[in-house]
Amino acid sequence: MTLSNGRASDVFTAAPWLLGGAKSLSYGVNVAAKREALARGADDVLFTSTDGYALEGPTSGLLVAREGRLLAVPSGGTGVLESVTVSVILEAAAEFGLTPGRELLRPADLLTADGAWLVSTVRGICPILTLDGEAVPQDPDLTARLACAAGF
């Protein structure tokens, strides 16, 4: 399910002292978000910005395959924590015939993608099967190749 993080997608560009992407500062919010998801019958959360962009999960990065590209959310101004797992998979994207990139997408874009995943070094490659009750397309073969590229 999507939950707002209460900030615009570029808030950290103008206010870098807010320490976007600092993992130690997000722990309490991440636990509360996961608890909210479970209370609403969802397995996980995809944080969104107040201006409508998909960002990351509480403990995971977002990858989306669409139109021949494998996309991740840009870090920096978004406050999204740079993910080692996302970076490793993006480096291998060409092996799957996909062009890697970083781009802001809206949650609705996931509903028309070829696949979307929350990825982390702890949990691995987790396909997003539904988002706010809507089915997200999946490619099981690509999921397996992403997992292999990340060492899972």
Image (spheres, helix red, strand yellow):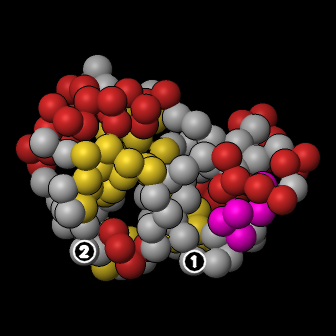
| Residue located at (64% from left, 70% from top) | 49
Q: In this view, does 88 lie above or below 49?
A: above
Question: Foreground residue, 71 or 135?
Answer: 71
Tell me which residue sits at (46%, 58%) in the image.
Answer: 103
Quarter of the figure with residue 15: bottom right
Q: Which residue is drawn at 43% across and 32% down?
A: 87
Instruction: Work out how far the residue at label 2 is from the one at label 1, CA to CA, in angstroms.
Output: 16 Å
Q: In this view, does 68 lie to the left or right of 22?
A: left
Q: Position of residue 135 (x, y in %)?
A: 25, 74
Question: Among all residues in the image, which is located at the extreme left?
Answer: 141
* Residue picked out by circle 1: 52
Q: Which of 11 and 43 is in front in this view?
A: 11
Mark 2 Cα within 10 Å, few/some/many (few <14, many 20+)? some
Q: Name the residue under label 2.
A: 112
Numbered disc 2: secondary structure: loop
**What secondary structure is the magenta-colored segment mainly?**
loop
Q: Where is residue 105 in the image (x, y as percent from the top left)?
A: 45, 67
Residue 141 magenta? no
Quadrant of the drawing holding the C terminus: top left
